[in-house]
Image (cartoon, rainbow, N blue to C red):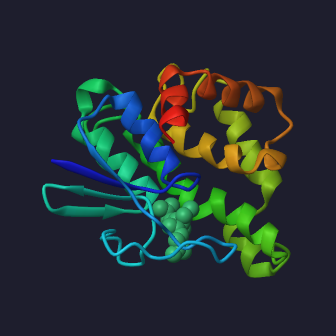
Amino acid sequence: MLTFYHASKSRSDRVLWLLQELDAPVETIRTDIRRQDGSGGRDPRNPHPEGKVPALVHDGDLVTESGAILLYLTDLFPERGLGIGASEPGRGAYLTWLFWYGGVLEPVYLLEMMGVSDHPIAHTTFRDREAVAARLSAALRTGPWLMGERFTAADILLCSLYLYLPDAVPADPAVRDWIARCTARDAFARAQALD
Ligand SMILES: N[C@@H](CCC(=O)N[C@@H](CS)C(=O)NCC(=O)O)C(=O)O
C-alpha cells in the first residue's frame, strides 16, 4: 500500500509526475503546507517530520526527500524501467544524478537567490551555475536523456527544478531540448492536469 502526500505547485509535483510514468497504484493525499509567502500551514495528516512534501508511506515505511522517494519508487517498480537497478550497469551514474540534485544542483541556485553564492565555502562545496550547466551539457551530448538512451527518474528530478526556475535554464540548446523532451511526455501532461 502506497500513500503519497502531495501539495500542488511544490516539490511533490515531481513525485506526482513519476507516479504517472509508473502508473503506480497509490493513494494521494492532498495536504496543506506552509508556503514562502506565509500562507498555508502544517497539515496534521502529513507524517513528514517537518510537515513538508513530498512524503511517501509504503507499508508503514516513511520516505522523505525527493531523491530518496524517486529512488525508492523506481526500485519498487523495476519492471517499469524508470530507474537503474542495483545490478545493472549505470547504477552509479543514476544514483549520482539523484544525489547530485539535492547535494549540488538545487543548492547552487538557492544560494544564488539568497545572494551568498560568492562565499568561498559555497563556491568550494557547490560551485556555480556555469559548473552545473557544463555537467548537464556534457551528459546530454551522449543521448537524449541523462542516462543516455533511457529516460529515468533522474530526468524528472533535474528537469523539475528548471520548471520552477525558468530563468535559470542553461543557454545550451541541448539542455533546452532535453527539457522540452521531458515536458512533452504524456505522463507529464497527466500530472499537470492532476495537479
Ligand atoms: N529537500 C526536500 C525539500 C522539501 C520542501 O522544502 N518542501 C516544501 C515545498 S516545495 C515544503 O513542504 N515546505 C513546507 C514547510 O516549509 O513547512 C525535498 O526535496 O524533498
Residue name at image x 50 percent, y 76 percent: 41
| Nearest to the observer: residue 45 or residue 158 | 45
The correct choice, above or below, for 18 with respect to 61 in the image is above
The residue located at (24%, 34%) in the rendering is: 77
Picture coordinates of residue 27 (x, y %)? 26, 46
**Quadrant in which residue 173 is drawn:** top right
Q: Residue at point 80% right, 80% down? A: 120
106, 17: nearer the viewer: 17
Tell whether 133 sits left or right of 73.
right
Query: Is 133 left or right of 75, judged from the image as shown?
Result: right
**Count of numbered badges drawn on the protein:** 0
Front residue of 127/179: it is 179
Q: Is residue 1 left or right of residue 39?
A: left
Q: Position of residue 26 (x, y in %)?
A: 26, 42
- Locate residue 150, reporting x and y percent: 47, 23
Residue 154, relative to residue 182: is it above or below? below
